[in-house]
C-alpha cells in the first residue's frame, strides 16, 4: 500500500533593507494559510 503526500511549497519573505515589516508579512501569510487548513511552519532567522 502506497501513500502519497501533497508536494510542500516554500514561501520566503526577504528584503535587504531593515524595517520593511518582513516578520509581520511572514506572520500574516502563515496565519492566512493556517486558517485555510494548511499545516504551516514559520522560521524567522532575523538575528
Image: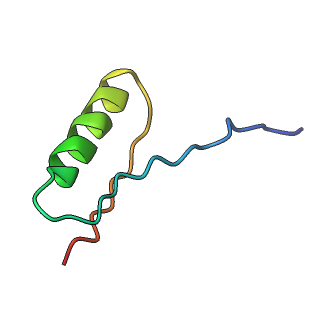
Q: Nearer the viewer, residue 37 or 32?
A: 32
Residue drawn at the location 42% of the way across and 52% of the way down:
12
Residue drawn at the location 15% of the way across and 53% of the way down:
20
Please state the horizontal and vertical placement of residue 46, each as a whole percent of the image. 22, 71
Please state the horizontal and vertical placement of residue 7, each as a whole percent of the image. 68, 40
Residue extending furthest toward the bottom: 47
Q: Nearer the viewer, residue 38 or 17?
A: 17
Please tell me in which quadrant of the rendered image residue 2 appears. top right
Instruction: Please state if 35 lies on the left or on the right of 12 as rendered.
Output: left
Q: In which quarter of the image is the C terminus?
A: bottom left
Q: Quadrant of the N terminus?
A: top right
Residue drawn at the location 34% of the way across and 57% of the way down:
14
Q: Nearer the viewer, residue 37 or 8?
A: 8
Vertical comparison of 7 with 10: above or below: above
Please state the horizontal and vertical placement of residue 41, each as a whole percent of the image. 38, 51
Q: How is the image coloured?
A: rainbow
Residue extending furthest toward the left: 19
Vertical comparison of 10 with 28: above or below: below
Please tell me in which quadrant of the rendered image residue 4 appears. top right
Residue drawn at the location 19% of the way across and 53% of the way down:
23
Residue extending furthest toward the top: 36
Amino acid at each position: 500500500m502506497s501513500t502519497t503526500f501533497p508536494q510542500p511549497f516554500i514561501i520566503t519573505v526577504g528584503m535587504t533593507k531593515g524595517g520593511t515589516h518582513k516578520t509581520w508579512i511572514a506572520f500574516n501569510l502563515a496565519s492566512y494559510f493556517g486558517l485555510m487548513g494548511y499545516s504551516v511552519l514559520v522560521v524567522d532567522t532575523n538575528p
